[in-house]
């Protein structure tokens, strides 16, 4: 077999990706890959997925011309892809609904998920309620304490939240606990992963389920401007909203693709999550990719003001797009993201998630240097209501 073919079948993007998991998990992953390939070609599956996106999540989301922000920055025309208007306030449900339909098709009855701040956990708990699945969400004990409201939200939606008390008691430990659960319950359980990360076929599957973002934005920008955008900017945690925003433009070299990751307190400090800007290549969460590793090669702690970008790795396709030069990745500090959060709120009356604010911040740097006949799309991955309290704290404002 040709090396290239072999690589595609096992989910490699160049040297990135793969399936770095124990043998019986690999068997389960191959089974998911085969089921997904069949589902992808099945019109009934696709119709049911489209109908859930429309009637449950409220798609399509608008592509909104941000006229005041455009005037204020004085450069390219800015459009916002409004993923914040999805049910539950973010892009995460696009992926959760797709994976849940696949679980149903595979005859599974029990759903598990990992969650950091609780955003993916809440989306999974909600969709599990809708599908009538038993749902268990693994969450680090530290995160449970920091995000009590989301723990309660998940419980209200009928899920069981398991507080993970090992290691750093955060996202990475929740992922490990979820894989252990999967190993013990392969027969009836499906693991819904929250981003374009993990072993094959997850990065591929999650990209397909988030692809709807660029399918819509491409159609919408062609209708509004009669041309493709010059640039698409999205924030990158694990990389699911970014890969979904980029997907339909990957073969349009005139469209510049820019990912904004979290520089936290600065990439010259230990407090950041800038995996591609300053990380190195290694294996984590079942994939080969860029990550933040310590000298012993172990996954190191990361930090960002934004819980959704606070992840020590990145989806393998982004690692590949970076090395191939097709996309460019930059790091945005907490301070820059908070300023962008305020800028967009005041200019348009749209409060972006602090994650999405990283993409807005990069746009604020680039747009003024562009020409008025150029067009930029910023993906607003989620709404910022959840972040208001933290922003006040950051600004030392008592509320
Ligand atoms: C979870 C989350 C992110 C980061 O995840 P990706 O997989 O990188 O998209 C970004 N924005 C919002 C609003 C989120 O909830």
Image: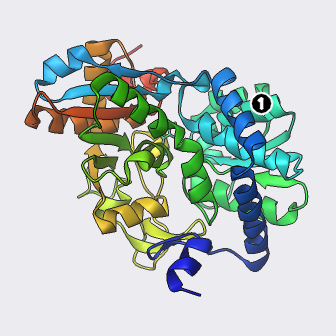
Residue 96, percent across and down?
67, 41
- Location of the N terminus by quadrant is bottom right
Q: Nearer the viewer, residue 8 or 133?
A: 8
Residue 266, percent across and down?
25, 51
Q: Nearer the viewer, residue 172 or 50?
A: 50
Residue 309, percent across and down?
44, 46
The single residue placed furthest to the bottom in the displayed view is: 1
Q: Quadrant of residue 178?
A: bottom right
**Residue 339 can be seen in this image:** yes
The structure residue drawn at horizontal position 83% and vertical position 33%, both measured from the top left corner, is: 131
Q: Is residue 139 above or below residue 67?
A: below
**Residue 162 can be seen in this image:** no
The structure residue drawn at horizontal position 80% and vertical position 29%, both measured from the top left corner, is: 130
Describe residue 29's horizontal placement relative to residue 133 as left or right: left
The structure residue drawn at horizontal position 52% and vertical position 85%, both measured from the top left corner, is: 3
Describe residue 108's horizontal placement relative to residue 216 as left or right: right
Q: Is residue 104 above or below residue 390?
A: below
Residue 360, percent across and down?
29, 33
Describe residue 229's horizontal placement relative to residue 64 as left or right: left
Would you say the beta carbon of the disc 1 residue lies within 8 angstroms of ligand 1? no
- Location of the C terminus by quadrant is top left
Describe residue 42's horizontal placement relative to residue 387 as left or right: right
Residue designated by label 1: 155
Q: Is residue 302 above or below residue 104?
A: below
Q: Nearer the viewer, residue 397 or 64?
A: 64
**Mark 1, other Cα within 10 Å: few <14 / some 14–19 / many ≥20:** some
Q: Is residue 207 above or below residue 160?
A: below
| Disc 1 element | helix
The structure residue drawn at horizontal position 70% and vertical position 28%, both measured from the top left corner, is: 51
Q: Quadrant of residue 63?
A: top left
């Amino acid at each position: 077999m040709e090396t290239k073919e072999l690589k595609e079948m096992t989910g490699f993007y160049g040297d990135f990706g793969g399936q770095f998991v124990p043998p019986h998990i690999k068997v389960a992953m191959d089974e998911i890959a085969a089921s997904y390939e069949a589902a992808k070609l099945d019109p009934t599956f696709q119709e049911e997925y489209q109908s859930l996106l429309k009637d449950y999540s409220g798609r399509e989301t608008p592509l909104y011309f941000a006229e005041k922000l455009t005037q204020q920055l004085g450069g390219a025309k800015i459009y916002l892809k409004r993923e914040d208007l999805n049910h539950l306030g973010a892009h995460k449900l696009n992926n959760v609904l797709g994976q849940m339909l696949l679980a149903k098709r595979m005859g599974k009855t029990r759903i598990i998920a990992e969650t950091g701040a609780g955003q993916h956990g809440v989306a999974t708990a909600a969709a599990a309620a809708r599908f009538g699945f038993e749902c268990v969400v693994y969450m680090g004990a530290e995160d449970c304490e920091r995000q009590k409201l989301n723990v309660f939200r998940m419980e209200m939606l009928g899920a069981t939240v398991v507080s993970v008390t090992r290691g750093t008691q955060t996202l990475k430990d929740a992922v490990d606990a979820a894989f252990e659960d999967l190993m013990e319950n392969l027969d009836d359980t499906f693991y819904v992963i929250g981003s374009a990360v993990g072993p094959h076929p997850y990065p591929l599957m999650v990209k397909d389920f988030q692809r709807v973002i660029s399918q819509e934005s491409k159609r919408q920008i062609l209708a509004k401007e009669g041309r493709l955008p010059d640039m698409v900017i999205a924030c990158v945690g694990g990389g699911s909203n970014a890969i979904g925003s980029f997907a339909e433009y990957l073969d349009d070299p005139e469209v510049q693709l820019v990912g904004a990751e979290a520089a936290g307190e600065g990439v010259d400090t230990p407090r950041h999550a800038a995996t591609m800007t300053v990380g190195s290549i290694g294996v984590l969460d079942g994939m080969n990719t860029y990550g933040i590793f310590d000298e012993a090669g172990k996954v190191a702690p990361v930090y960002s003001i934004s819980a959704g970008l606070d992840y020590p790795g990145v989806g393998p396709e982004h690692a590949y797009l970076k090395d191939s030069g097709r996309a460019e990745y930059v790091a945005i500090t907490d301070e820059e993201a908070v300023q962008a959060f305020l800028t967009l709120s005041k200019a348009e009356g749209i409060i972006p998630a602090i994650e999405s604010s990283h993409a807005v911040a990069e746009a604020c740097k680039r747009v003024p240097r562009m020409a008025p006949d150029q067009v930029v799309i910023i993906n607003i991955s989620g709404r910022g209501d959840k972040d208001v309290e933290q922003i006040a704290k950051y600004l030392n404002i008592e509320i």
